[in-house]
Amino acid sequence: DAFFTCRKNAFLAKSSSPQVDGDFAMAPRGPDQEECEGLLQQWQEEGSSQALSTVSEGLLVDKGVAESSLAHLMDNPGEQDAASEDKWSSRQLSDLWAAENLEESFPEVLGEEPLPEVEGPMWAEVPVQTGPQYADCAVLPVGALAAEQWEEDPAVVAWSIAPEPVPQEEAPIWSFEGLGQLQPPPVEIPYHEILWREWEDFSTQPDAQGLEAGDGPQFQFTLMSYNILAQDLMQQSSELYLHCHPDILSWNYRFANLMQEFQHWDPDILCLQEVQEDHYWQQLEPSLRMMGFTCFYKRRTGCKTDGCAVCYKPTRFRLLCASPVEYFRPGLELLNRDNVGLVLLLQPLVPEGLGQVSVAPLCVANTHVLYNPRRGDVKLAQMAIFLAEVDKVARLSDGSHCPIILCGDLNSVPDSPLYNFIRDGELQYHGMPAWKVSGQEDFSHQLYQRKLQAPLWPSSLGITDCCQYVTSCHPKRSEKRKYSRDFLLRFRFCSIACQRPVGLVLMEGVTDTKPERPAGWAEPVIEEDISEPEPDFPRTVGTIQHCLHLTSVYTHFLPQHGRPEVTTMPLGLGMTVDYIFFSAESCKNGNRTDRRLCHDGTLKLLGRLSLLSEEILWAANGLPNPFCSSDHLCLLASFEMEVTAL
């Protein structure tokens, strides 16, 4: 009986029915016994080789039999092809399954009274897409019946039971309830496609003179800068990550995601911040070594457990020197923080087939500046030390500098005084509120504001206002005094040597006697010291400078979206604090100065990985998320260096 009932409903679905505009849903009601007998007899008489007669419109509407919108899916609703019986008989099992899933009490076709009308599941039309395999047929979306995997005729599978109506509540943009509905992406899907990041290619753009890149040999490489979020710091500030599911915050999950991201982009140089020391030595360094990197690490001073790392591929570069930088200075309140930096000087390796050629060395500097938005004075002092170290490492014998790439988490927003100081090479800071240096937060409403005073750091630090070490500004004299042994013995019994020092402890047989000058010992003639005193370096009044000529890889604005770029989202507020600066002489293009264009012999920017807007990261539930396992986005850029013949 269930089989006959299901077949009857299937034929009714394939019968012609008037076109109904809009969405509709009708509850299936059991027809009267007499009508059921008539329908069954009609089906038995006509058989599978004849077309089923159309049921009158009034009968369907009055008795509540579910109308089928599939009438418009058939070219000739009043005709049935000869193979329809075979077609339906091959799907008897799926028909029975469908009847069981309906969980509807159908009346017996013969010899029983119809059951009273009860409320049941509603029939509803499922929104479908039109596929090319059916001229007028609707194809069910893949996910609609994926769990059941029906292999039905489109006239049957385009329908499903409508779910019970549930009141819809508008989901908040920034949810703190977890990410249970999000699943990690498949391995085969690239990260830049999931996060909608595109590669911006500048290699075909003309240079400042309107000419394209030269045909000579060029050395190209890629560099990535990434704050990977130390696990200890994340656990210490767990209130910042309440929006994240706990599973995606575990280090094992995050480590696998980070390594997959490194493998996908495959940079030649990798600059990392917030690298936890135990994770570095136990997992990161061995894994990166297997990927072909040589790694250098500098842990923060004090009791901090994270630091900075710079990794490079020895197949592309040869290390010339590595210089760790510590900003902590004992006894100096301005520099009592534990931030660090790392500066490497690398020699690019060109293929042997190019013959006798040379490439200038490359200085790569990586740092993580203090976060505190109120202490801009500390940020400026740390950056001055860092720039002085870069100046020392990158300085050539002729006084010029080799190409420089400075990157890291500077905890400053674009167009802030600290950012403009790095880009423009000069900053007038005297009287500036300390919070304004980084621009992270606005504390102008506070009554008391710390203001910067000149000079910003004491002369004992040994760094000039041009962000250079004093020894770099005043190189040591090449001529040095050379004293022989005979010359030094002349001062053995001089007057100063025969005087008893004040406070000397009296020890019998050791310090209780006074040395006597032997007879005939001539009084030595002390030559006058004609050496010039170390000059005091001049200090400017409230101005600091540097001469490294740096510019940013990113423009910090997305013209296609009309929104600023974002590299991190603390508490759901997007901002840019991560940067890649590179040395590029500013070139005038008419009345406009474009610092991204560079002269021959320096770095040329070939491309960069686009950043995202705040709205896009909101859609991904912020940072971290199942796809990006840090609270920062990675920065990636491609550069080119000129290869010169010897």
Image (cartoon, helix red, strand yellow):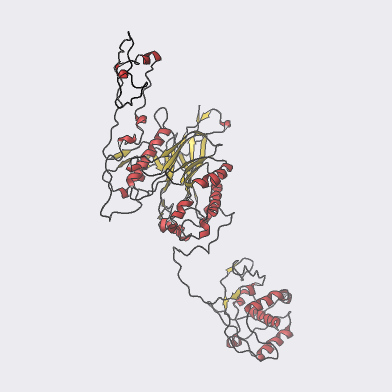
Residue 149 point in image, percent of width and height = 65, 69
**Measured from the top left, where is residue 268 in percent x and y?**
53, 41
Between 375 and 10, the one lying in front of the other is: 375
Residue situated furthest top in the rendering: 520
Placement of the N terminus among the 4 image quadrants:
bottom right
Q: Would you place residue 297 above or below residue 198 in this image?
A: above
The reply to whether residue 583 is in sight is no
Vertical position of residue 449 compared to residue 83: above or below = above
- Give residue 235's position: percent from left, percent from top: 46, 55
Left or right? Give the position of 427 relative to 39. left
Side of 252 where 133 appears, left or right: right
Q: Is residue 313 visible?
A: yes
The image position of residue 404, as x and y in percent, is 43, 37
Q: Nearer the viewer, residue 480 or 91?
A: 480
Please identify the residue farthest to the front as the structure is shown: 508
Instruction: Between residue 497 and residue 439, name the one nearer to us.
Output: 497
The total number of labels drawn is 0
Q: Residue at horizontal 39%, vertical 13%? A: 486
Q: Nearer the viewer, residue 249 or 574?
A: 249
* Residue 333 placement: quadrant: top left
Residue at image location 64% in from the left, 66% down from the top: 133
Q: Quadrant of residue 207?
A: top left
> Residue 50 falls in which quadrant of the image?
bottom right
